[in-house]
Amino acid sequence: MNRKSYLLLMSPGLVLLLFFLVAPIIKILTTTVITPQGLSLSNYTKFFRDSYYMAIFVRTLKIAIVTTLFCALLGIPTAYFISLCGAQKKKILLSVSVFPLLTNSVIRSFAWINILGKNGVVNSLLLQLHLIKSPLNLLYTDFSITMGLIYLFLPLMIISLVGVMDNIDPSFMEAAESMGANRVRAFMKVIFPLSLSGIIVGSVLVFTGSLTAYTTPQLLGGNKHLVMSTFIYQKAMTIGDWTGASVIATVMIITTIIVIKLLNMLATKLDRREKDGN
Amino acid sequence: MAFMDLSDICVSYDGKTNILKELDLSVKEGELVSLLGPSGCGKTTTLRVIGGFIPPVSGTFTLDGTDMTHVPVHKRNFGFVFQSYALFPHLDVRNNVAFGLKLQKMEQSLIDTKVNEMMEICGLTELSDRFPKNMSGGQRQRVALARALVLEPKLLLLDEPLSNLDAKLRISMRLEIKKLQKKMGITTIFVTHDQEECFSISDRVAVMNKGKVEMFDTPENIYTTPTTEFVARFIGFENFIDFTKLEEHTYKAQDGSLFHTDVISVKDQCKATIRPDDIKIINDVNIAENSITGKIIVRTFLGKSYQYEIHTRLGRFLVNGDIEDVHKREEIVTIYLPSNKLILLQS
Amino acid sequence: MATRKNTPLTIIAIIVFAFLILPLVIITITAFGGENTIVFPIKSFSLKWFANVFNSETFVTSFLLSLKLALLATVLALLVGIPAAYALARHWEKGNTFLKSFFLSPTLVPGIVLGFALFQFLIIILQIPLFIGLLLGHFLTVLPYIIRIVGASMEQVDISIEEVAWSLGCTKPKAFFKVVLPNISSGITSAFMLAFINSFNNIPVSMFLTGPGVSTLPTTLMNYIEYYYDPTVSAVSVILMLATIAIMYLVEKTLGIGALLG
């Protein structure tokens, strides 16, 4: 097609994106650097010097890392299991894995309120078994937020991995085992390295998702146990500190971009090593 | 004046490298012309310029007196058959064939008549409800042809239509295409890299190289008297000698030996070529002209002949010798190049 | 490949699947409880919470709003995204990779940041009505799905069939409608489903762009949970989960479950 038609077809999308995505975000960025004293990064220095803000930032990072680790630990064997199944079973298991992803995150987080609450399943069970005397405070903690996020993102990790593992030739495993490796070693030496690209992709999705999630930390962490996203909401809607909210939002965007870049660099490095090793 | 004429056509994708350089081609009405050449020579590009998919940077394209250079594709009424056949996957055979007619807002009964007739001619009547994905390569090819021909186009353009078929089918399909073409009298341009295919059905062949037509003539003429080194090599000539002209029919090779030829070269320096089959291995060492001595380096058995690679003062020669007259490796022999078999190349 | 007996792996897989399903089962059971707060296991059976949902004006209005919004946002995304995907697939331009990433960039922006940015820009500064702001926000969120899925579908279509259509007398726009669209229809449907579901379930953008009378279902749910702890939420959850299962079943029968994996 000629240039004219190309631009004609692209322009509605480009215009809408420029006006309603790029402009608002630039507005946020500029808000953070315009201070009464003129252009400066003082808002950011204030952010990183404030122990309260840093505690929230570190908590968010910690939760995201732990969530990603557990999603990987649980997701890799499960995805491997699915990839080994016959077509019929695989379809059913994949549907079971996809279903939570299509369910609203309010529902999925709410489920954990039921489980971890003072009158929830866990406490009732422990009380009934006389393992504790009074209900435990499981909600509104790092633990509850992490549990909720693991629950939220585990299906995503599984789906990311099944695709990659499906493409691994099963004869590789058989070859490894015929050379004397037991199942676990064969898995670690064959399947794991070959699915590394899927693991990285899945980890990027889970990490950035956990870092920026709102619903789950709001429901399971509450207003007293904040992470970056709930902090933004509080600053913007409850307190009315637009600049403060913008600063946190910018830090969040930049952290996300840095993590994605780092993990992608890791992926290319491992990719290259694998190509050389093979 | 020719029916279809390409004149001085230049095509370039990025403004720097020319895919087609001042290409000229004149085709007569009702002719089946092939564009033959190695990959990258520009034959498909030429076809696509004719089809209207690629606008030329300069030059003109005329059809039956009308300048078509800038006419958009959908107004040209040319039938185009792609290498992949490009059948519409979502339509059955009947609707594929009827597609162009439906666009002309013809009466349905007329469409049905024309479609049925064309499907009959192409042997597709039993397949009219089938979908492309359930059809073989040969069947799809016939649908592609029927779809193009049912519109009675002024030109039929075929881009390597047989390359995706197996060997036997290729032979039967090319004869069918030839028969159909002659019956309907449609001027046809056919792109291929297969020499045998092209020579067997074409009225004339344009041998292309690096964006230009090197030779445009009947298959017989190309085969017997190629005019350029590229064409000669392309159709299988293996032996080349540099000649300097002494007289019209006498030429001198690099080592001074003399050769007589039946044909004449206009240039003083030219190249001569001869087929392996036409060179004779002789026992009479007294023949002075049109002969050289050399040593047999390799002998290969070809079934109906032996092929010898002979190294001489004038270079290496490939000679096909009689089955009855076997020579050994390392043997010194004299080869004789008959004057009526030596071909002089003009460029 | 047949599953070889690998007991530890099977056990892990079973535990994980149980982990994924049980919490949703728990919600379902609590939805039928007769007590006034959420108890598990339920001590009595009642359907009153479902009645509560259908009788609540807030829930019904939010549900209808979410439906309307998801439909409009998805249609808008299709109208804008399909031409863009077509242009990106059919025309080679040096900036193509960049432009494609640009169209996919809303996924890089955290939902909460997008919601906040739009709130500041559209509502406070430009003073656009809330519903339009919501529509734009959801449009931005679902556009990447359209570009990705329809784009992939488009790339599978041999460009020669368009060229052939032109040679048979079809103008370029007509060829798009007659020849390209029918062959990407499953891609479009798949993109539509994913976009619709993601718009309906969106929270961060909707949380910011909310106001009196303009509240999506997830927002209403979240607010409800902040104040009340009763099985109404469970009932809504059950209804939504049933709807999701119904959609998954429909998609499986027509396009295959792969369509939802995006």
Image (cartoon, coloured by chain):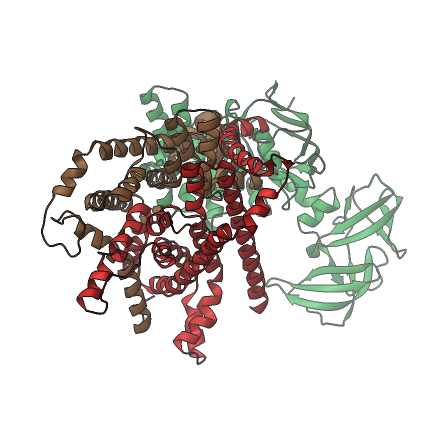
| Residue C204 at x, y percent in the picture | 39, 41
Residue at image point 49% right, 50% down: A53
Tell me, yes or no, if residue B343 can be seen here: yes
In this view of the protein, which residue sits in the foreground, A9 or B150?
Answer: A9
Instruction: Name the image quarter holding residue C49.
Output: top left
Percent of width and height locating residue C220: 29, 37
Could you tell me how many numbered marks the image carries?
0
Q: Nearer the viewer, residue A186 or B302?
A: A186
Q: Quadrant of the N terminus of chain A?
A: top right
Q: Is residue C2 left or right of residue B32?
A: left
Give the residue drawn at x 64%, y 41%: B220
Quarter of the figure with residue A181: bottom left
Q: Residue at x 82, y 60 (%)?
A: B292
Residue B206 to residue A213: above or below: above
Q: Colour of chain A?
A: red
Pick whichever, B265 or C173, lies toward us: C173
**Whole-percent x, y for residue B206 in the image:** 65, 38
Q: Quadrant of residue C152?
A: top left
* Horizontal and vertical percent position of residue B146: 42, 33
- Residue B305 or residue B316, whichever sits in front: B316
Query: Which chain is green in the picture?
Result: B
- The chain whose colour is brown is C
